[in-house]
Amino acid sequence: MDSLERLASLFEKFPGIGPRQAERFVQYLLRGGSALRRELAKTIEELSGAVERCSECMRFFASLKKSATPVCTICADKDRDAKLLAIVASNADLNALERSHTYRGRYFVLGGTISLASEKTNHLRMRELLSSIPARARNGLREIILALPANPEGDATAVRLREELAPLSKESKFAITSLGRGLSTGSELEYADPDTIKNALAGRK
């Protein structure tokens, strides 16, 4: 496999990217010239040194300096409502909620959804989520919002989360809700427009 084929195969690993799109990316980089390719390579190389994972919400964020317990700007914001916790599948879903300018609570990034083929959860941050709940409850947690994709994988993940969170919900007296019908069946949260997300949040139950 030559370098062009290798690069195309790497692009194919990106979510939603097939062979034809991957080939277009490669051709674009070739047409863009060496300056573009150097900038891309440098930026990718810098990711390992400039990006950290928040110790509270688990999202990836750009950081100017390394910390043993890194905290992103959202989690560090004292004005965020600690009574609300939205569980999202990915950073992209978190960003979509933020763009709606409707939600002012806190987040937890689960790291994906349950695959219906295996139903395994070892790739998800389930343990980290559950271990964080007692402290969040002491800090005033009153509602967990399952802000997951409106598709079979998202539904399966929501069912599993409700099962895992039920004992803690009963003990600490917080509600567990899901986004309302503002999101159509089969839709991905990251692609929803702000008004749709606003309606989904308003109609949660």
Image: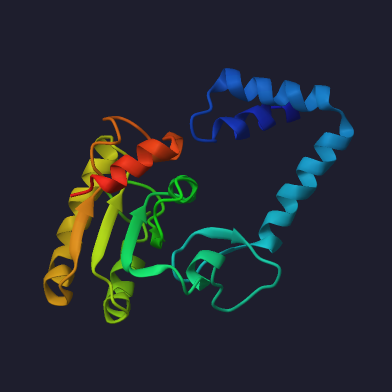
| Residue drawn at the location 44% of the way across and 35% of the way down | 193
Q: Nearer the viewer, residue 49 or 65?
A: 65
In the rendered structure, the answer to whether residue 52 lies left or right of residue 92 reads: right
Q: Above or below — where is 47 with respect to 93?
A: below
Q: Indicate left or right for 149 with 6 as reference.
A: left
Placement of the N terminus among the 4 image quadrants: top right
Give the quadrant of residue 110.
bottom left
Residue at horizontal 34%, vertical 56%?
Answer: 87
Q: Quadrant of residue 39?
A: top right
Residues 111 and 180: in front is: 180
Left or right relative to 199: residue 67: right
Residue pushed farthest top? 20
Q: Is residue 114 visible?
A: no
**Above or below: residue 200 compared with residue 9:** below
Whether residue 47 appears in this view of the structure is: yes
Q: Position of residue 56 (x, y in %)?
A: 44, 70
Front-most of residues 152 and 6 = 152
Q: How is the image coloured?
A: rainbow
Q: Is residue 84 left or right of residue 95?
A: left
Residue at point 88%, 36% (across, down): 35
| Residue for point 74% across, 52% down | 45
User: Where in the figure is residue 125, as x and y percent of width and height?
Assistant: 37, 61
In the image, residue 138 lies at what x, y percent? 28, 82
Q: Position of residue 118 (x, y in %)?
A: 27, 42
